Amino acid sequence: MKNLSRCLLSLVFTVLLFSGLSAQSQWKLKQITAKRTKSHIKIDGFLDEADWKEASKAADFIQIEPEKGSPASEKTVVSVLFDGRSIYFGFWCTDSEPKKIAARMTKRDMDLRSDDSVYVLIDTFHDRRSCYFVCTNPLGTQWDGRITENGRTVDSTWDGIWKSAAQRTDFGWTAEFAVELRSLKYEPGEEKTWGLNLGRGIPRKLEFSFWTGPMESAYKVSQFGELTGLDLKKAAKKIQVIPHFISKAEEGKKTTAQAGLDARYAFSQAVSGNFTVNPDFATVEADQEVINLTRFETYLSEKRNFFLEGSEIYKQRINLFYSRRISDIYGGAKVYGKVKSFEFQGLTAQTKENQDAGEGSANFTVFRLKKDVMKSSNIGFTAANKLINGKNSGTTGMDAALYFSDRFKFTGQLALSYGDKNTDNVAFFLRPSYDTSTFHIHLRYTQLGGNFADNANTVGFVRDDNRRELDSALSKTFFPKKLGFERIEYSSNYNIYWGLDGTLRSWKIDQEVDFDLKNKFSFSLEHHEEFKLYEKEFRNRQSELEIGYNTREWQHAAFSYSFGQNFDRDFHMLEGEVNFKLTRDFSASYGLERVLFDPDPENESTWIHVLRATNYFTNDLFVKLFYQINTAIDKSNVQVLFVYRFQPPFGSVQIAYQKGTGEFGERGVQGNTLFLKFAYMF
């Protein structure tokens, strides 16, 4: 282990030295001045108001893919306006083949990169670390979110209040945005400057271009341009109250009704608080069943709104806070904001009794603080605690994300867990990495004490402990434009770890190569080889071939076949998915997984079917279907949700039907159930 430590230190020193000697990427700082408008801007996508034509123009977009640094193949021009209520962006998108413009996504918050699309990224604190993004396609569909830590974290759970519209034209298409200032955090004042980037995607050309560049990645906030001339007053309402009422009628049970309340209070334009009583988690979509070929716990994404907002601040390599550890709650409160160079969030929630786990009511309290350092780096502190029956357990730790250049980054974390076992309870990792728009390499060393996870998993998510782990990865993207190939991506990963006593517990090698062809077909080859030591030594392997059609757009089909050995069992696995639109407003997706084990003494071979469908009557009137089957556990789950948002995105009427909803990996026993929810925003 001493030799390993010396190698790690030598590598870190070498990469740091290389980073210091390497030249910064050459890009020019661009600026555009926003024009104040006193006229009414109608968000219809036509851009026919006089102010649009008189405003300053942002143009000369630069490709990040496929030909980094080259001018965009199609012309894009953008203007920016603002008033006391909103900030407006208008796009003119020229296309030499307008009939080939692709726009199929109609559901809000779907990733729009598979459609022709335009993007606005605004760094409202001009800290060159984080930003909001809003995006639309030629149908006016909305996608928004937050980017933090200079691109390290991209999170689409933020829902702002904004409007968008688009129109097809004889030269291409136009788009219009109005982002309400009350949904953003910023420092009010005169002649303020925000960071700004503007983007456009043309999926049929595999092309993404941006106003500033050439950037190292689309999310590199430190390389944004500037939006100047903003006179911004405090825009948020002091308080916003959203009461809701929900009734539940389940087959064979007594009909129930309950009320709840969500409130938001703006301490300032940069700091806000949230308070909830009896929040509604009943109509949240069930977790999708998946096949897990490991012996580790499956990580499940958060879907509950109270925990989603601002959740990106907790994302770390060693997950000290995992909100799925918190079950249904009586209520909770949190505060989130940024003051000068400090960003912070505090959260507390009181859970209801968990009969499945045999636990009484518990209190969860979490605090996160980040401090901006250097040009676009940060250091942070996290503490998460669970209090139940007078007993505390949880985690605390420090972390850092340091950018020594636009390409070289160093991240690290040191954590301590506490609870029943307060020895051998320390964890840390060190990770230097080097990134360009087409290349990535990193080396990571992690050490987890033998009792770290026992305490940490009361509030966090740690798959395994008692390990000294070395992980390395390399990936490279090529754009050959020859022999029918448009893009080739290669990735390789090597992982090995030992127990703290020096026993080799595991190693794994992952190899993958992906091909995108000019005829819209794609295929990939993967091979995984690993050694595992549990009750005995195991050699697992998996080889996979995947074939897809039109996978660079949302409407596509893909099919894969894999085989190998998994813990002394041979297996064959089929996976497939298809996304399609039957009409402009109706979209659906179907996925299947089939795995066969031989031998299969515990009858784990299974079929998993998942169907999702959405029909939008208007942007705020829609119906959604979710249906899944897992034959291994005899699970059949269906959910239908009808929504009318008369005060988007919060004030709404919802009618939901559910049957068979249950915990992930467990058969649901819920009978036919009908929910009615009404929420109003004051």
Image: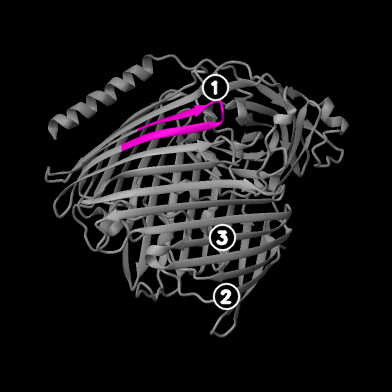
228, 583: nearer the viewer: 583
Task: Give the residue number, with chain letter if any, for mark 2.
Answer: 673
Judge whether residue 540 is colored magenta.
no
Using a 10 Å C-alpha cutoff, classify the residue at mark 3 as few (fewer than 14 neighbours), some (14 to 19) or many (20 or more). Answer: many
Q: Position of residue 150 (x, y in %)?
A: 49, 33
Sequence order check: which comes first, mark 3 or mark 1? 1
CA–CA distance between discs 2 and 3?
A: 15 Å
Q: Amino acid at mark 2?
A: Thr
Q: Which residues are magenta?
A: 512-527
Residue 71 image offset from top left, x and y in percent = 63, 16
Q: Secondary structure at mark 2?
A: strand
Colouring style: one colour
Taking the image as shown, residue 73 lies to the left or right of residue 289, namely right
Disc 3 marks which residue? 626
Q: What amino acid type is highlighted by mark number 3?
A: Phe
Q: Residue at x 49, y 25 (%)?
A: 487
Other-residue count near label 2 (Cα within 10 Å), few / some / many at <14 / 14–19 / ≥20? some
- On the image, the x and y values in percent for residue 484 come to 52, 21
Mark sitting earlier along the chain (2/3): 3
Residue 519 on the magenta span: yes
Estimate the spatial distance between the alpha carbons at disc 3 and disc 1, rounded to whole Å. Answer: 36 Å
Residue 128 visible (yes or no): no
Q: Where does label 1 land, which residue?
A: 66
* Number of residues whose C-alpha sits closer than 10 Å to that of mark 1, classed few (under 14), some (14–19) or many (20 or more): many
Q: Residue at x 59, y 53 (%)?
A: 272
Dominant secondary-structure state across the stretch colored magenta = strand
Q: Disc 1 versus disc 2: distance between alpha carbons?
A: 50 Å
Q: Quadrant of the N terminus?
A: top left
> In this picture, is 645 found above or below 186?
below
Measuring 72% from the left and 33% from the top, which residue is drawn there? 230
Mark 1 and mark 2 in contact? Answer it, CB < 8 Å. no
Q: Earlier in the sequence, mark 1 or mark 2?
A: 1
